[in-house]
Image (cartoon, grey):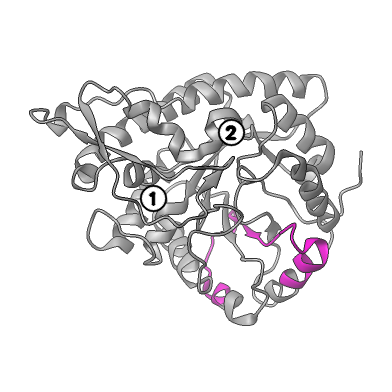
Amino acid sequence: MSGREIHLCGSIPLADAEEVFVTVSKKLGGAARRIPDGETGERLTWIRWQDHVFRDHPQLEPVPSEGDYRNATAILGGKSIAHTTWWRIKDGVSPNALEMRPLGYAECAIESFRTFESLQESGRIAADARFLIAVPSPFNVVNSAIAPHDRIRVEPSYVARMMQEIKEVAAALPHDRIAWQWDNAHDMQAFDGARQSYFPFHWDGIAQRLIECGDAIPAGIEMGYHFCYGSFGGRHFVEPRDMGAMVALANRLTAGVARSIDWIHMPVPVERHDDAYFEPLRDLALNPETRLFLGLVHDTDGVEGTRRRMATADKYAGGYGIATECGFGRRPAETVGPLLDIHAEIAGVRAT
């Protein structure tokens, strides 16, 4: 049970990037090879943060949202984070003429890396750690923020702007000191049939979009995928029946992405320590360079529950790393330290 690598999915609700970097490094040491900035502040609302891209856009207009299939657990700080507004293309505007504003991911990544680099130079972060940039795939944002009729029409301009953000990060930051993660919540839910998509043949459409996302990251930058079923109020948007859909999507990405995939993360619900949930992992066909992380760490049952889930997982997968099932974003800040302590005990990390 010792020597497990730890993966952090992204959001960590502390004060700022510096507190996240220092806290994680102190608690987990070198067991966490990639450290995110926590997506602190407004970014803790995840895709809802992208509203700034569409709000008051001269080529778009707001319309009331009719809902996006989310459940009542979509709460952060006592307020709903489900979209109450959609945006559509204004009459007379051609989708081909739509120009998307900067998304903010490149700007935030470049700013956070300055803090990361300073802390690394002072010895407060391990010298070989990489800065993890966690970003929702375009499908998540378009599928949530844009009115259904216009999703397929807005998607190309949003994707084009995302590709520009990647180029800006790649030009500004050293490739061998950063990693890029694609967050895939709406993607995974739609692939598993739990959420509608705005294109036919959803298996093919989701996989092809994520293949293109993967290939957009320059080869010198580590790249991985965080499969997700949502995390609202500590519960998934929908619980996976088993790991079958995740394995099917991972195998499609493995066969389709031209560059290396450095990791794939798959969630494990707290109550699932049964063989039926993990058995599909027998069909997982990752390349040797791809590390599997299982999101089986839960603070509700701590070390004992995590080890129970690991005991079953060990029957179907070997050499996997550990993680929570999603980011830490929608939890009280005071729970972060104890949750990291569970990771540390499972991974055999000595306290510093």
Q: Which residue is at the far left?
A: 92
Gap in angstroms between the C-alphas marked 2 and 1: 24 Å
Q: Position of residue 100 (x, y in %)?
A: 29, 26
Which residue is pictured at 27% across the width and 40% down the height? 64
Instruction: Give the mark nearer the N terminus: 2 vs 1.
Output: 2
Does residue 67 appear left or right of residue 329 in this picture?
left
On the image, the x and y values in percent for residue 60 come to 22, 28
The one nearer the camera, 16 or 300, is 300
Q: Residue furthest front?
A: 78
Residue 343 pos. (x, y %): 78, 52
Q: Which residues are magenta?
A: 280-309
Residue at 25% across, 53% down: 198
Q: Is 91 placed above or below 253 here?
A: above
Q: Position of residue 61 (x, y in %)?
A: 22, 30
Amino acid type at mark 2: Glu
- Which residue is tagged 2? 39
State whether residue 156 is above or below residue 209: above
Figure quadrant of the C terminus: top right
